[in-house]
Image (cartoon, coloured by chain):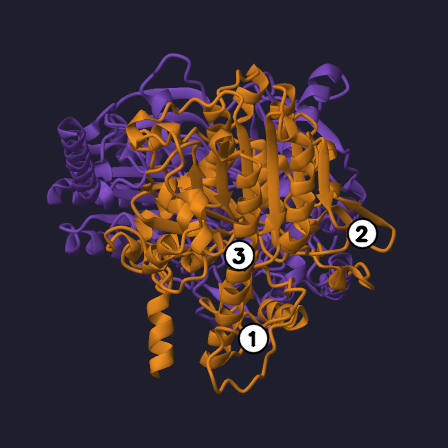
Chain colours: A purple, B orange
Amino acid sequence: MTARFFESKRYHLSIAMLSVAFCLCLETNVVAADSSSLKRHENTNVILVSLQCLRPDHLGVYGYKRDTSPNIDRLSKSSVLFDNTISQANLTPVSMMSVLTSQYPRVNGMIAFDAAKDAVRSRTLPEILKYYGYTTAAVSGSPEFFMRYDTESGTEIKLGDVFSRSFDYFGRTRRGLGSSLRVAPTESLDWIQRNKDKKFFMWIASGVIHVPYAAGIPAADKTFFDSPGYTPFWNRFHSIQAEEGTPDDTTYDVLMRLYRDEYYLGFKPVHRLTPADKDYIVSRFDAAIRYTDRFIGQLVETLDRTGLSSNTVLIIHSIHGEDLGERGTYVHYDLSDSAVKSALLMRFPAGEMGGRRVPDQVQGLDIVPTVLDYLGIPPDHSLQGNSLLSLVKGEAGATGTEYAYIDRIPWWEHTLSRWYLEFKNSQVNYPESEKSAILEYGNMLRSAFPQGSYPPGDVAIRTKQWKLILRKSPRLLEKVSWYAFITGTPLPYGDVELYDIIADPLEQKNVAAQNPKVTDVLKAKLLEWDASVEKRKASYGAGEKRFIIPYP
Amino acid sequence: MSNQENQNEQMLINRRDFIKYSAVGAGAVAATMALPGFMLGNAGAVDLADLPMKYKDYNVVFVSFDALQAAHVGALGYRANVTPTIDAMAKQGFNFTNNISVASWTVPASMTWFTGVYPSEHRLTNKFSVFNPPNNNVLSNLKKLSPELVTLAEVLKQNGYATGGFTGNAGVSGGFGYSQGFDEYFFEKGKFGSMGVSIPKGLEWLQKNKDKKFFMFLHGYDMHGQNVPAEGFDYRFVEKGYDKKYTGSAAEQEALREEGLEKGAVALRDSDVRFWRAIYDEKIQRTDARFKKFLEEYEKMGLMDKTIFVLTSDHGTEFHEHKRFDHGFSLYDELIHVPLIIKLPKQKAGKLIKDQVSSIDVMPTILDLIDVKLPEKVKKQLRGESLVPGLKGRDVAKDVFFETDYRQYTYKRGIQTKDGWKLIYTLENKNRELYKLNKDPGETRNLVDQEPRIAYELEQRIFAHFKSIGHDLNAKQWIPGLNPVYDSQAKGVSKK
């Protein structure tokens, strides 16, 4: 009896002690934490710098000859540099949302430029960081993230959709010297100085490198790489002028009339590009990079001066790349490597692991999982990317992404059909010979893409050696093709393209027929991915009012 | 607040408050006084510490009182004396005060007892596995949906047990495969049947099998909204002066349920809610009395000392706690917190076990108690753990998971940690509800915004749990549809 009594007392005592232990860890230990995992989220800031149209091969650190990026080159010495980063899309809002959610575009729902306010419900990085006590701020120099048009009223509205959701502060750039909003997001530097004592996440987006390249920056910087005495070729023809640029600017309207080295006006080639013409376009692109690099230098200087370098993860990445005529087109129309290959560097606090280079292929959607992993935050179940930390650390067996996937959604022409063409019609002084044809083309696009319908898109899979592009509806693509329209010549599309990106990095030669086995394997893999994405695709805010994301 | 209301409030002692009471609820104490002879002083009764916990070849009687909310059981703190027989057994047996069902309605919840896997895995998550009216409707069936699963009755049968199930049909109808492994399985087609029918059928079977070792499943809908007593209500608990807006019929209950589903809330006056609880109490008390008669007959057969009793319920029911009525469509405490009482042969001293456990643990516990050697396949199949260590005094508290895809009206998944956090995640709209049950047992304050990190981490736990059992919740879209449970919904519907 006594023994039993003692037993029971001890039992109750141990239960009580257990309960105390429970109460102590209750608030913070809902998920059983790996005892070795570091809780860096308690005191580490994160800055994500997203740059539109930045081609890695135009940065010194990736081997570019021109001195476009002294600051990034210097920063890379204390950073981890990724040599093969692939964006999930060739268009800014689509690719960026893929980064912020670590989800493929159709899964998060950012699949078009007519976005409903709640089209994207997926979690974003700032949302997760806020759960862990971060102050979140953004300064965007890319109108894609803050400007929305209401086609009914014809006015710009402040929609506050998913790009600004979960930010305690969301700043934007104003018009610079010219009419372009695409100026350096320097307000971010002030915010960082003012808030250096908070634990923060800062997202900085810049569109300076976007067409019209460097249009909003001081003339001396804009013309820095110009050849002396060069006059833009388009000035000899009917001058096409749009709101965003001055006559010497590389406007969208000029660049989208270039096809296979010919300048088209009135559905005819009117000028063959000379090396000087091409050099001018590239020079302006590089001048935009140089100016952006200077901003990066200021950012790093701010972090050093405030002491934040020692407790801040700084990530710089391209939202996507840019075509500079390699495959016949400019801007970022298709899934070429030049349009989807991205720069990516990560500087960890105090330059930890600095100087490492990662040759493996990785994806834009790996950025968020890497940040969470580094901070010791459990990964969200909805993430589709992978943490790159083990790869960075060189852990045995760590590899990159064997298969990267890219979605060309929406087609450029879908975006034109929604608003852009109409807008441009009223804004751009097209040649008389194009005016009525452009109206008809717009009508045709609208009938090809009825309201609420989205083109099937194209998809691509990429390995370290191959890239395979699948055109889901080549006949429709041929019908709506902008380049078929401006050249007045039908452009045939096959449904499969395979490129050997090692032997043929500019993707000039479709070798699908010569490599049937590779084609079959990659195609099957790509279709498997496509089906898995279709199964879980977002409902895209059906029935909600849509607003236009301006472009360019 | 009127006196009557006050009294009613007090009657509803929440299970979280329950630990404040030293022993068992007042109702249970009262019940002990009124105990029939069979429960007390059985010859050869042994003390708790001397119980062998191994009962090879003993009988098992497994009873499901369908739709019995934990808060209405005296042994779990209810103040009204409506469950004297159940309470008496609880007092002599192990009374799990924090047992959480894996689901909030019969079809998915009950099959988990018999397969030891979660509803997502046994796949009886709706009445129809295919519902494409008028011509393409396929009733859910265990053998078709999950042919690899072995049932509790099959294991027992393989071990030489006679197996008999005596039920009220509907959600545990043989048609779903509930009969798998039973020598005899009674269900009255087209009914939400009563123990008034299933008990006599069971006793008949017992007469024939009492000399063998047997496993008996006894079930009835007597407490369920779709069942009314054959003899009618006497309204014994209804307060005087109620204006009789409702009469307690199955049709009224159904209309209230459907109104709640359609509008998100039912307009009920406090007096109506009290009326419905009074009706529920009457049903419970009548059921308890039927069960008492069953036990009396059982004792006459001399089987008490040779039998393990397991008393439980598949789910609770809602009386407007969250503005709706009936069950299945959500995962609140009133729907998933259910009694679990295990009384071992010759056990005379009972014990409260406050550790949080799950209905997923029932099958492994029974198999452990009767000490059968489990085939590897069954060992691998079982997701829960035996609660026998808990009977021996060890800590068996665990975090538990639950789910419902009720009629495809909604798709919900949930977790409840042993330290009292609960997250309900609704898949079709990603809605999250976070409750701190110790402070908010009524689940009225959603803390998602105040405790975002806890909500986030619990959400990860839910998704990780379902992924670990082969159900990646992200692998598909969750689109609400129509998958009727009740005939009235299935008749005349056309595909949308």
Q: Chain of mark 2?
A: B
Badge 3 crowding class, 10 Å Cα cut-off, few under 14, some 14 to 19, many 20 or more, is: some
- Gap between marks 1 and 3, in whole Å? 74 Å
Horizontal side, residue B269 vs residue B148: left or right:
left
A345 is higher (above) or lower (below) than B495: above
The reply to whether residue A370 is visible in this rendering is yes
Q: Residue furthest right?
A: B135
Depth check: give the residue in front, B135 or B55. Answer: B55
The residue located at (50%, 32%) in the rendering is: B307
Kind of residue indicated by mark 3: Ala
Q: Position of residue B23 (x, y in %)?
A: 27, 50
Q: On residue B313, which mark appears?
A: none
User: Looking at the image, do the residues carrying marks 1 and 2 touch, with CB atoms under 8 Å apart?
Assistant: no
Q: Chain of mark 1?
A: A
Is the residue at mark 1 from the same chain as the one at mark 3?
A: no
* Residue wearing tag 2: B132
Q: In which quarter of the view is residue A466 placed?
A: top right
Secondary structure beneath label 1:
loop
* Residue wearing tag 3: B289
Q: Chain of mark 3?
A: B
N-term-proximal mark, 2 vs 3: 2
Secondary structure beneath label 3:
helix
The residue located at (39%, 35%) in the rendering is: A369
* Residue wearing tag 1: A154
Badge 2 crowding class, 10 Å Cα cut-off, few under 14, some 14 to 19, many 20 or more, is: some
The residue located at (34%, 44%) in the rendering is: A49
